[in-house]
Structures are given as structure tokens and as C-alpha cells.
Amino acid sequence: MTALTTTPAQDETSGWRTALPHVVPFLGILVLALLLPFVSNDYWVLIGTRAAIYWVLISGLNLVVGFAGHLAIGYVALLTLGAYTTSVLVAGNVIPAVPVFAALPIAGLVGAVFGVIVGLPALRLRTFYFAMSTLGFATIVTQIALAWQSVTGGGIGITGPEFPAPFNTAWGFYGLCIAFAAVTTWMSANVARSRFGRALIAVRDAEVAAEATGISKPKMLIAIFLFAGALAAIAGGLFATLQTYITPDAFTFDLSVLFFIAILIGGRGSILGPLLGTIILTILPEIAAPLAAWSTFLYAVLLLVIVLVMPGGIAALLDFRNRRPLASNRSIVPRPAALAEIVRQRKGGKLLKLRGIELAFGNVKAIDGLDLDVTPAQIHGLIGPNGSGKTTTLNVISGYYAAKAGNMTLGDEALPPGQPTLRAPCGIARTFQTPRVIGEASVLQNVMIGGSIEGRATFVEAMLALPRNGEDERKLAAKARALLGVVGLETLADVRADRLQHSELRFIEIARALMLDPDFLLLDEPAAGLSNDEIERLAALIKAICARGTGVLLVEHHADLIFDICHQVTVLNLGRTLAAGTPAEIRVHKEVVSAYLGG
Amino acid sequence: MAISRRDVLLGSAGAISAASFSFPAPAIAQSEPIKVGCLAAMTGPSSAPTIGFNRGVNFAVDAINNAGGVKGRKLELFMRDTQGDPTKAVNATQELISQAKVHAMWGPLNSGEALATTPIMGRAKMPNLHPCVVESLIDPVKFPNAFRIAPSNNQWDDAVRNYCLKILKVKKVAVIGDTTGYGVTAVGASVAAFKKDGAEVVYQANVDSTQPDMTPDMLRAKNAGAEAIVVWSVSTGMEARMFNVRATMGWDVPFVGHPSMASGELAGLVAKPENWKKVYAIGYKSCSYDGAGKLPPKSEDLVARLTKANIVLSDTLLWWVAGGMDCIELIAKAVGESGGTDSAGIIAYWNTLTTYPGYFGNYRFSPTEHNGYLTDEIVMSEASTAKNGTFALAPGYT
Amino acid sequence: MLASILASGLAAGAIYALVGVTYNTMFSTSRVMSFTAGQLAMLGGVFGSMFTLKLGLPIIVGFVLTLVCCAIIGIITEFVAVRPVLKSLDQHLYVLSTLAVALMIQQVAAIKWGTEPQPFPRLVGFGEAILDEKFWLPVAACAVTILCLEYLYRRTLVGRAFLAIAEDNFAARALGLPERNLRVASYALAGVIGGVAGYSGGQLLLAFFANGGLLNFYGFVPVALGGLGNNRGAIVGGLALGLFQQAANFLVGGIFSSVAVFTLFIVVLLAAPQGLFGAATARRV
């Protein structure tokens, strides 16, 4: 059927075997880092220390820039903050002197708080605006460091903290920084591989779909802003020690650009890539000393080349697995029968009821007094000409639009209007007219997104790879693989989603929606772009889903599919119900036939 | 390691090598060049002084090497461009120490760089001569390896204050600096010292050097009754705006302060040449000409030598070039007199210099005083009178 | 004192407003916010000083050459940093590509032109003190630019085509408008406006490489205040910012005035993300 190997069994040993290729490069870099002091001199140890410290910051920033896609170009501000906080605490010119190992965590806390403050605009604004606000913050911090002379020493600066033995030698401090870097790599990798990391990418690349799966963007972003801010401030404390003395002019915009570009050279959504990027950018100006004056220019050229020529960065170069060609003759063969093992059987259940829904865009009434009932274990078809309000109805149910009038109830409870992230917890899942999948993530990860709200581990548990997170991951992965089996895509589980065909993306969306084990499933033109064979298989799949007790609301243009599988059909025209009834009734409905079915 | 008075007084490189026979040294060390590291901001903001210093450094190195080196050992320069960035300066310092293994270092000049690199050089016991003005850099206990061959900021401050109070005889001053680290600190120190001497500081401010209009601060200084404006900034743009505003206000107040007020660019930045009059910038006896246009004899000789060697002086300052030369000669002499490139020997030699006649001025070092430059070498000069990197003495000196 | 605040505030505000209009002009045809807006204004000052003072050309020749050079830089930006990333606008790669170009411009200026501010020629020799031409040239330039833009947009075919593309890119293309050429033209126009901003403000800001980053920010604030693509909003926002900043300079002094501006900026962004005169967001689903 396909040229790909079958899914490996998910026991412990094979889990390790699949993880190993990911871990080996990191271990390799760590071994090289530990060997460095034995084969070089204090100078290269200093450069190594610098790279390690930058990486402590970048490993956190990577989650903000590389995973969440927020262009924070002023993160040197948090480095400055951490450097000054640690130095001031250790110097004791505000409160009695604090030992450096206590000062670092305090700086981390301060950094976490300010990380959120700097990040706040990102909750409402994207890209350019956010970039500008981080830049603004970077300027404020430097100005304050200059002006607050009694604390920061103003322009004359302040001595950096000194670590106790054995960390007070070049090698000892190098070892400490490498240890910090190793720990932060481990923590950021844990976050990246957990449902939080996937959710970040989902918010970045498919924000609307992420909301439908119940991912709350503010919560996610605040968590990583806390994390990245803390790491940046700790890096600042280490930076101050390395510099021995800090003045505001040490925290240049060039440094900020270095942090930012290291991530983009490394590649979005990768950890190894930005790590290599950091090492390269730290060493490059040293070995190309004659280029020192041009180094920022060089960074800029690199950035442009990366953006235009290889947007995937180093990570894309290293992604050998996704260069293997996919079989061209593959077909989607769902196995609806397997659904029984994954989705629970429901009996009865609540009714999803819409009454008198009205919605207008400007002066155009998109929905004008719509009543609709979606019953458990039934397939409800929603048809009508273009612009009749079908997708808009789905969007009202999903909470993307708040209706102007009317109400929605689920059983006896009102569905709060206009809050898309609250639909998943109510058991309402959906697909989209144009599939909204994360192209850069694997098929399996895309499906696992659907189960985000089922995870029980907190962000901290995920960061520290505590057992509950492992359990979540295993459960989600197993369920996602099983569902990929149901929709017939299990052989493509590890392939990047943007390499798939359009029809396959539709089935990924269905699998993702099923991760919720939903009471109601809203399908927006699932048959568009499918071949006749595929439509038949889709029909069988939808029927099987319905048979488990899920209520399905199906928006579709393929009249055959609708009349084939629906229990109830509602016909919309200009936002109003033109007709409603069983397929048999609709088929003979005069107005429908003349207006829509065309005889 | 006794040194003869004669050697100290003879400043030429030839004399150093002539004295070399009395110090037997291992054969390897004899042929190995004397490696001198230079940390210089050759590009980037505030790179102008280092470019001048480098001319002096290169000139002195060539002169010594052409005369046969120090006891047969040539001087070798290791230049590192730090771009005024403390991070790059720290990297370069460690590289010079651990990789290039230099024997002595010059620089850096920029305060942020110097503050960060001094402890690193201290750890490596690297003999270091630098021209940075920041007070705290010189501490013979913490950094026994670091010596200053230029005035400290306090010395500058003393000179400016003395000129205001004793020669201009003003009672009320305004002190204005930019918002850089240097500006903020210098204004603070200056204000404190003026108050201590009983003068009235009627206005003080740190102004963003990019601010397009200096009228607000000048107005406030005028309304407060300032009789002189003391300027602590390296921003020539800001200084030019202040000079121009003074002219448009029709105010006749003198500016006294930072040497950058005498920078050549100002000629283009001021709206009219007369706006640059009555501006008194810090200068040095060795680099100031009198009413007859004459420099001190030693400096006249130096300018002649530099002109002969085609060293351009018109776009830099003589004191930068002279300071660079003094630095190299101090290192060369220390190696010659101490018999080798051992850092303890070099440092010990510098500590014995009770009078060292340099080109830039006379230096005096001791084990407890590493601020070698003498305050009475500092004078005020007329900012707009640059001639071959030298200036006319400000009015009031005899 | 008040007169001084007004003069320098309006002058600085007019420059910020023009940089804001530069942003908007590029945005209107491409939906791209470009980091090069401030750099174009910086180049206006640097080229102006270079042609007139360094090369000794007559003022009018220097002015025209400055605008031509800025227009060329604008066109290069379109080709290098905008066109290649337009097809994936939702990935916001333009933030990175235009940042890269802006950094390149700034670095080349720093290395080739120098890192010290250099003088800018006096143009008409008009006025003294608060009537000095350096305060009123930017204001006049801002007014003239606005009048020209109004004429262009309301009375000429090209201008209406600009508006059509700004309104609805797809529809405009469907109507057969040469969308690509119009976009290039708008980047050239943006270059000219940025050049005018820098040239008219040259005496105030001097020919200084670091002005680019500064104007990038201070020019963006009016856009954020006035709403993306809204030129009137940018003008009002720019002048308000200039007056606010200069008033802060007078009242609280140097260091804290920039802190005040940044704080104001972030607060406005949080309170009114679409700007005070901006339109609501586009539909997402």
C-alpha cells in the first residue's frame, strides 16, 4: 500500500531508540564542551563560557521566538536587568549583601516578572508592534541603569558578582556555566516536546485551530514569558560575573540582535539549530577578527539570506528524515471499526440548540434568526448556496463570532458566546473549510494538539519532565496514533504535515478533532477536494463516529453525501432557514429543489 | 635592578639598547620579540582618540625597531579593535593574554571597556598602561599591574574648577553633561567638587545628546544666573547645539570643560565660527602654544620629528599621539631596564619612576601611586585654535 | 519657554509624522511594516550633507540627488526585502527581512560616513532663535508633503490606483491594476518622503548614522497612535508626540523624557491596540 515502514510498537525500549537520534547531537556538543579546557587556553574557555551564558538566555528566548513566533528583538533588556539585579544584590548597596547563589534565583524571579511585563503587549499585538515594544523596553532599562546612580553606579557601573571556590577560576566558572546551559537545554527541550511546546507552535501557525482545541493563548504565553524572563535574568547574572564589571554600554543592541538571529539561523521550532546558531555567532567574530567592524553587517546579511533562501535555518538542513521521498501512490484507507477501541460509546446525551441567532457584518445580515438542533448520535446536514451563512453558523457555535441576538444552549447550560477556547471543554470539536494544520510539525504532533486540554501535568511538571507529564505524553501519543489508524494515515505519522496532500490534511483535521472524544463534531466541507473513493470512505467514517453517540453537524456542498448519511438536513438561504427535515423531505421540497438543487 | 639616572633621562631608544649588555638573559628570550597588546576602539563611536594614540604607538614602535630594538629584541604590536564594546574588549583582552601571550598592554581608553578589562588583566598580572580617566581604575592594592599615563577624571575636574574659580573668578556655574555613563558620572563628581569649594552650582542637567534643541537647558541655566557653563560630554553634536543656542540667545557665558569641545568637527557643526569662541577645553602644557605660537621646546622637536615621518597631526590631537609614544617607550624602557619581559620586573621598574619625562608630560609613579600624570601639566586651551593638534592657551595663563 | 517648546516640539513632531507617513506609504500597497522607514530619514540627512557640504553641489541639486538616492533605496528594499516574502505574509518574515536591510543601511552608514554627527548645510538662511528655519522647515515640509499626497490620492489616476490597492489588493489586481509596479512606485514614493523628512530635519538632527534607529521608533509611535495606514492619524500623532516629548524634556529633563515616551507608547498599545483612529481588525476565520 505504501512505501513507508509501519509504526514502531510503543514500548519503553523503542521509545528510547526513537529519542536517541535527537539526544545524541546534544550529548556530542556537551562532550566537546567538556573537552574544551583540556585542549585549549583560557581565551577559548572564556569564549566557551560566553557561548554557554548566551545559550542560557537563548534557550528560553527560543520558546518565545522560535516556538511561539513572537519577534522579541529587545531581549538584551532582560539580560541587563538580571546582570544588575545580581550585581546589586551581591554588592549589597541596597539591602545587606546576599550570597551569589541566592542572588541568582532572586534575579531569576525579577526577570520572570519583567518577562511577563515586556511580553504583555504580545497578548494583544503581534509581530512589528511587539518587536517595537520590546525595543522600547530595552531602551528604558538602559536609561534607568544610567539614571539610578545610587543603585546601579550609573555610567561608572558596578562590579560583577564573584562566585565562591571552585567556581572562581576560569575553568570552574566555565564548568558552572556549562552546567547551567545543560540544565536549561534540558528544561526547554522538555517544554518543547510537551503539549505546551506543541500548543505554542499551534498558536503561532494555526491560532484559530488552537483555540478550537481549547488552547488558551494568554496562559501559554505568560508561562513561557515567565520561563524566558527567568533564564534571561540568570544569564545576566552569569554575564556580569564573566565581564567582571558591568556598565550600561556593555548591553548593546548588537547583543540583542545576536540573540535574535541565533534563533532564526538555527531554525524555528528547533532546539539543536539555535544552539548551533549561538555557538557559531559567538565564535564567528573571534575567528574573523578583521571583520569585527563589519560583524553586525554580516549578521544582517546572514539574516536576510536565512529569510530569503532557507527559512528553515540550520534545523531544516539537519532534518534528513523529511527529505526521504514519500510514496506518490498512497491512498487514505480509514478503518472506522477501530474507533470502538478509542472513542467511548455514548448513550443519550445533551442537545445542542440554537434559537433565533442573528449576526451581521456591517450592514450585511449573515445570519438572520436561525434555529438549529444538533442531536447526539445523529448527523445534521447544513446546506445552502455560497454566502447563505453555513460556515458563519459553525463559527458562531465555535465562539469565533458572538451572535447579536438569540441564544445557544448545550443541554440546560447556555454556551457563552464569543469564547472559542471554551468549546473544547464542552466537548465540541471542529474542522475547517481550509485545513488549519501546522505545516512544520509532524502529522502525529498535529493530531496530538487536539488532546491539549486532556493533559493533566502543569507547565512546571512538563519543564522538569516529572512522571505525570510522561504519562500525558504517552497517552496522547498512543491515542493520536490510534486515531491516525482510524483515519488511515498512520504510516505518515512522523512526516511533516506540509508535505501532505490536501485530502490528507482533511483527515488529519478529523483525527485532531476526535482527540477530544467530542460530544459534537462540526465538519466544515470535509469532502471538498476529495476523490469519489475518498468521499465514500469519509462517509463511512462519519457514520461510524456518529454511531459512537457523537452528534455531527456537517456543512457540505456534495448533496449526495448529505442525502446519503444525514439524519436531518437544514437548508439555509441568506442566513435564514429555507427548509428543514429529513433528507427525504428536503429532496422533494419545492423551494429547495428550484433554488438550490436545481431540479 | 638599579637604574642609572642617565638612562632615565635619555629618552631615546638607542640609549636603551646601549645599556643592555649588563643584563644577561636566556638566549630564547633574547631573540623573542617583545609583544605589546593594544586594545583600541578603532571603529565605532568615540574611536577618534584611539586613532590618534595608534599613530603614536606605531611611530614609537617603528622608531625603536629601526634603532635595533630593545637589546636586540624587536617590539611586536598586537592591535585589537574593540569597537567601544566592553564585551568585545573582554574577549580581546583574554585573547591577548592567553593566546597571543603579550608581555604588556596598552589601553583601553573607553571607560566601559577599561572597567571590565582591568580586573582581567589584574588576574593575569599583566603590566598595563592606559589613558582612561575613570578614577576607580587605579588602585595599587587591587590592581598593582595597572598604571595611568593620562590625567584622571578628578584631575580634569580640578583643572576645570580651578580655571573657573581662580582664573575666570566666577561664583555661579551650571554643569551640563550628556546621558551616557560618562556624562552622568562626571556631572555628579563635578557638582560635588564645586560645592565643596564653595561655588554655587545654580543648574545641573544630563541631556540626551540627540536632543534636537538645547534651548531649554540653556534657558534654565541662564535664568538661574550661571556665569560659566561646565560641560562634561564627548558628544560634539550636543556641544555644537549649545554653542549655537548661546549665540542665538545673545548670551555671553563661557563654556569650560571636556576636551571634546576642541574637536575639529565642531568647526562644521557651529552655525558661525564666532559661536565657537569663548569655549575653553581641557588641554595640556606640552601641547599648548603661547601667544607667540610656540610650543614648549621638547614638543617643538616632537612635532618636527612627526612631520618628518609624515604622521598627520591636523586631524587628530598631539596629546593622543604623544601619549601613545610615551606608552611604548615606557614599556621598552621597562624591558630594557628590568632585563626581560617578566611582568613582575616591568611593574617593579615602573614603580621606581619618580620623574619620567615623557612627550605628553612628566610622569611620577610609586608603589602606592599609579596616577602618573601631574595635575599641573593640565591647562585650559582655546577650543577653536587647533593647529597641528595643538591649541592656544586659554586667557589668564601667564 | 512655551514658544520654545512649541517650536522644537512641532519641528520634531513634523519629522516623526513624516516618518510615520513613510511607514504608511509602504504599508498601503504591501501590508508590510518596514524597519527601513527611519533609515530612509537618516539617509536624507546624510546624503543631503554629503552632496552639499562634502561634494559642494548646489543646494537644489543636492536636494534632488538626495531624494533620488532615497527613492532608489526604497526600491531596493522592495526588491530585496519585501517582494520575496509577500507570498507568505502571514509568517511575518517581512519583519526580519526589513530589519536585516535596515541594519545593513545603518552599518554601512556608520562605517562609510562615520559615527560622529556631521554638519548639515543651512538652506535658506531664514530666521533667528525660535523662528530659525531649522524648526520651521520640517513643519513646512510636512505640510507640503501632505498637500501633495492629498492631490496625488484624490486627483490623479496613479493615486487612486494606490488607494484601490490599499483598500483591497485582490480586487485591485482582478481589475487589472499593475499591482507590482504600483508597489514599486509606492516604495520609491516612501523613499522620497523619508528623504524629505531627513533632509528638512537635517539642521535639527544633523547627519548622524544613529538617527535611523531613533526615527524608526519615534516615527512608529505616531503610526501606532494614529492607526496603521492612516496618514491623518500619523500627522496628528506625530505632532502630539513631538510636543509631548519636548514638553517632557523641558519639565523633567533628558533621561526621563525618553522613558516617558516609551511608557506612553506601551500604555497606548495596550489600551488601544488599533490606534486612536484605527479601524477594527480584519476577520480571522
Image (spheres, grey):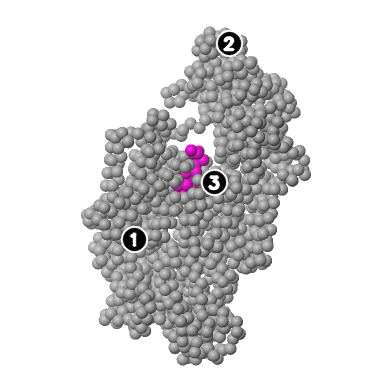
Identify the residue shown where x is 69% and y is 50%.
Answer: A23
Does residue C184 lie above or below A23 as drawn?
above
Please, what is the three-letter code of the amino acid marked with disc 3?
Met
Viewer-side label of 3, 1: 3
Q: Which mark is residue C118?
A: 1
Identify the residue shown where x is 34% and y is 39%.
Answer: C232
Give the residue pinned by disc 3.
A310
Image quadrant containing the N terminus of chain A: top right
Residue C98 within the segment the image draws in magenta: yes
> Which image quadrant for residue C31?
top left
Q: Which mark is residue B72?
A: none
Give the residue pinned by disc 2.
A587
State which region is magenta.
C87-99
Please, what is the three-letter code of the amino acid marked with disc 2?
Arg
Mark 2 neighbour density, 10 Å: few (under 14) some (14–19) many (20 or more): some
**Mark 1 near mark 2, Cβ–Cβ under 8 Å?**
no
